[in-house]
Image (cartoon, grey):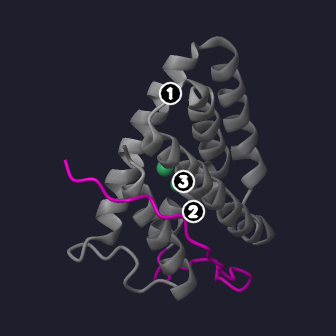
Amino acid sequence: MTSLPIQPRKVAFDVSSVPRHWNGGDPVLTRFFDALSVHFPEGERFFIQSVRNFKDQVTDDQLIEDIRHFIRQEGQHGIVHDRFNDVMASQGVDVDKVTTNLRTFIRTTQKYLPKKYQLAMTAAFEHFTATLGEAMVSEKSDMFGEADPVMRALFLWHGVEEVEHKA
Ligand SMILES: [Fe+2]
Ligand SMILES: [Fe+2]
């Protein structure tokens, strides 16, 4: 397994004028990624918390640093996707309905499942996001070939960082 360094980046995406079907005018291709975007902020805050639960038990310096950068990356992803999700809501998508359901699921998980299990869930989800991230940045499958350039940059940035912090 090759390991990439986790690099927190300062980014800014002006999503204010992203069109409704931003991925090449294709509603299906757009809504696939929109659905991910709607789930990311709550999901990533869950990932952060599940790692934070164990932070004080970690003694390895590199791992402590990796955890710090992981939390920073996921925190940034949540902020950026929240902004875009607000734009989607202003375009008529019922973002609240999805996030309310997701929040209920996450709060239930946090209340009733062991913290180790929550961490395992995070590891599993990170596997999926890294796999998707790898596919997104692959030259063979440009999923954003015709996309709005801001959204293309946003998802590629997120994809790269998912690959970096997958472990
Ligand atoms: Fe993320
Ligand atoms: Fe992640």
Return the residue nearer the eye: 120 or 62: 62
Labelled pair 1, 3 in contact (Cβ < 8 Å): no
Q: Disc 1 marks which residue?
A: 119
Circle nearer the viewer, 1 or 2: 1
Residue 69, which numbered label? 3
- Residue at 40% x, 66% y is 160
Q: Position of residue 118 (x, y in %)?
A: 54, 24
Q: Position of residue 10 (x, y in %)?
A: 62, 74
- Residue at 69% x, 83% y is 14
From the image, give the main secondary structure of the stretch colored magenta: loop
| On screen, residue 108 above or below 68 | above
Q: Position of residue 109 (x, y in %)?
A: 63, 21
Q: Which of the 4 image quarters holds residue 156?
A: bottom left
Mark 1–mark 2 Cα distance, whole angstroms, equals 26 Å
Q: Which residues are magenta?
A: 1-26
Q: Secondary structure at mark 1?
A: helix
Q: Amino acid at mark 2?
A: Asp
N-term mark: 1 or 2 = 2
Q: Which of the 4 image quarters holds residue 164?
A: bottom left
Please state if 77 lies on the left or on the right of 134 as rendered: right
Q: Secondary structure at mark 2?
A: helix
Q: Amino acid at mark 1?
A: Leu
Mark 1–mark 3 Cα distance, whole angstroms, equals 17 Å
Please state if 28 lies on the left or on the right of 106 as rendered: left
N-term mark: 1 or 3 = 3
Q: Secondary structure at mark 3?
A: helix
Residue 34, which numbered label? 2
- Point out the image quarter for the C terminus: top left
Q: Amino acid at mark 3?
A: His
Residue 43, which numbered label? none
Magenta stretch contains residue 18:
yes
